[in-house]
Amino acid sequence: MLERERDDHTGVETTGHEWDGIKELDTPLPRWWLWVWYGSIAWAVVYWILMPAWPGISGYTKGLLGQSDRAAVVRELGDLATQRQAGEAKLRTASLQQIEADPELQAYAMQVGQSVFGDNCATCHGAGGAGAKGYPNLRDDVWLWGGTLDEIRHTIQVGVRSGHAQARGETVMPAFGRDQMLTDAQVTDLTEYVVALSGRKADAAAVGRVRQTFADQCAACHGPSGTGDVARGIPNLTDAEWLYGPDRGAIRDQIFNGRNGVMPTWEARFSPETVKALAVYIHANAGGDAELSTPVAAAPQGSAVGAAR
């Protein structure tokens, strides 16, 4: 057996491989590393035997333990449903007003509502319900469709322009410019008129030119003074709440193209108890709008065709 060459500097044998004058040392792997490696191999073999591991043509190996994450989730959901039964029974029989009057029941409803909101509503309205451009802010007291508990619940149940038989939003905002109902010049003047309605400085000449146009085209929905109509979800153009932005460009775009927001109906997906809990959660986080016989004043949350809540 030939003795292998040793490196002059380290005294370690070489492997006999050489690249561009550089020789490879035959340095042994650390003992601890080898044991970890062997242990990993042993652990993998044990895992393959005990747990689901190898895929097949029509299934996979189930393992001796029969572990199933899917089955575990089903069990956990069942346990959660059992824990919630008492609270859901109370929600089922209590009115919305009774829920908010009972601290313990309200706390339960808030927990359920927060969970449901995070999973289903935060995508559009934001994690905290503060909304974004085109999506209403649910943390203030500005409500297009009414901010009482019953009104919030109804909106959640049937949605807005959702196709539900009782859906809200039968009234739509026309695309005055796109459909050539008004000229570009009229749309520009009408933008100034809406700016003036919200109490801001506007082009007086443009306001004068388009005053009759507003009366003919817009007053039927927004009212002669632009204050809107909460019964039909018509936005108020006289306040400072805008869904798509308060600048002239955003307002003009609203008038020109028309925007008619859609909110899905959740009645088929959520149980009545869940809808109640969600309504309580939204109502409480919006500042607790009082249970009035008439809803708070409508607000556009959106330029010429606000789609605020």
Image (cartoon, grey):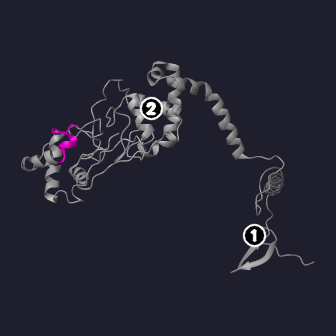
* Numbered circles on residues, count: 2
Q: Earlier in the sequence, mark 2 or mark 1?
A: 1
Q: Is residue 4 above or below residue 71?
A: below
Residue of label 1: 9
Q: Residues within 10 Å of mark 2 (few under 14, many from 20)?
A: many
User: Quadrant of the rendered structure where residue 170 is?
Assistant: top left
Identify which residue is drawn at 67% across, 42% down. Answer: 73
Q: Is residue 120 visible?
A: yes
Q: Position of residue 254 (x, y in %)?
A: 25, 51
The residue indicated by pointer 2 is 279
Kindly give the residue lying farthest to the bottom in the view shown: 20
The N terminus - image quarter: bottom right
> Is 208 left, or right, of 88 in this rendering?
left
The image quarter in which residue 238 lies: top left
Magenta residues span 217-227
The residue lying toward the viewer, choosing from 23 and 133, is: 133
Residue 223 location (% of width, % of height): 19, 39
Give the crowd class for mark 1: few <14, some 14-19, many >=20 residues within 10 Å: few
**Separation of residues labelled 2 and 1 (CA atoms):** 79 Å
Looking at the image, which residue is at 76% across and 61% down?
Answer: 58
Q: Left of 123 or right of it: where is 228?
A: left
Could you tell me which secondary element the residue under label 1 belongs to? loop
Looking at the picture, tell me which residue is in the foreground, 43 or 216: 216
Q: Is residue 16 left or right of residue 90?
A: right
Q: Name the quarter where the C terminus is drawn.
A: top left
Q: Amino acid at mark 1?
A: His
Residue at image position (61%, 24%) is 86
Amino acid, disc 2:
Ala
